[in-house]
């Protein structure tokens, strides 16, 4: 059997010491908050939503002026956003989430970010971490443009602990 040059041998992985380790139970509320904030920060999604609302409310700008048109636009945008969150909620409820909504353990190691549950164990070397984002209620460690490990604020003992965690990952991903 050939050795895979891209795979770290299990014996090497198991003996790494964690620089920082967190354990937490990911709840549905955390999962929903992440999805909501992720959509809100998505530039393509927001451009689409703004364009759609502008298209729908354009007549108000023409017929009633900029002030009334702007108010109608803002109300329509907020209503669309709430409607999309209701759809998001329905989608998240309807999907099977047992491997997401469970106890997670994350570790910052010298060469990787490790996430594990009773269903999986994932190793992400630092060059593979896309970014880390903080949202109200959660921290997201992005491993792709649309995939992230979600860490609720309650996993941290204090706001300073959360800041230290975020800084440690930023330092590892930027090579500082």
Image (tube, rainbow, N blue to C red):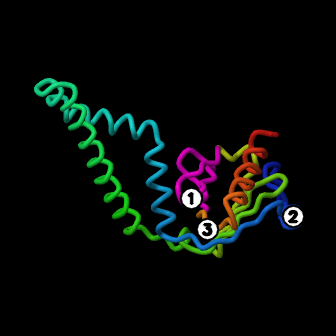
Residue 17 marker: 2
Q: Is residue 6 above or below residue 17?
A: above
**Residue 30: x percent and y percent?**
51, 64
- Name the chief secondary structure element in magenta: strand
Q: Is residue 135 above or below residue 29?
A: above
- The CA span between labels 1 and 3 is 9 Å
Residue 138 marker: 1
Membership of 150 in magenta stretch: yes
- The CA span between labels 2 and 3 is 24 Å
| Residue found 63% across the figure and 53% down from its top | 141
Q: Are marks 1 and 3 in contact (CB under 8 Å)?
A: no
**Residue 21: x percent and y percent?**
76, 65
**Residue 167: x percent and y percent?**
74, 48
Dot 1 lies on which element?
strand
- The CA span between labels 2 and 1 is 25 Å
Quadrant of the snapshot with the C terminus:
top right
Dot 3 lies on which element?
helix
**Residue 164: x percent and y percent?**
75, 54
Label 1 or label 3, whichever comes before in sequence order: 1
Label 2 or label 3, whichever comes before in sequence order: 2
Residue nearer the viewer, 64 or 10: 64
Per the image, the residue denoted by label 3 is: 154
Q: Residues within 10 Å of mark 3 (few under 14, many from 20)?
A: some
Q: Between tags 2 and 3, which lies in front?
A: 3
Label 2 or label 1, whichever comes before in sequence order: 2
Point out the residue furthest to the left here: 63
Dot 2 lies on which element?
loop
Q: Is residue 12 above or below residue 79?
A: below
Q: Which residues are magenta?
A: 131-151
């Amino acid at each position: 059997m050939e050795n895979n040059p891209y795979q770290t041998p299990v014996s090497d992985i198991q003996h790494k010491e964690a620089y920082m380790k967190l354990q937490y139970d990911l709840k549905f509320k955390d999962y929903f908050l992440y999805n909501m904030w992720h959509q809100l920060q998505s530039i393509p999604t927001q451009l689409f939503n703004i364009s759609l609302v502008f298209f729908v409310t354009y007549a108000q700008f023409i017929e009633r002026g900029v002030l009334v048109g702007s108010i109608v636009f803002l109300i329509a945008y907020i209503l669309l956003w709430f409607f999309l969150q209701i759809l998001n909620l329905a989608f998240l409820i309807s999907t099977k989430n047992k491997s997401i909504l469970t106890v997670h353990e994350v570790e910052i190691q010298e060469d990787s970010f490790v996430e594990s549950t009773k269903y999986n164990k994932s190793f992400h070397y630092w060059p593979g971490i896309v970014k880390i984002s903080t949202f109200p209620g959660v921290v997201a460690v992005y491993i792709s443009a649309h995939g992230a490990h979600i860490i609720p604020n309650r996993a941290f003992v204090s706001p300073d602990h959360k800041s230290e965690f975020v800084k440690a990952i930023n330092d590892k991903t930027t090579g500082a």
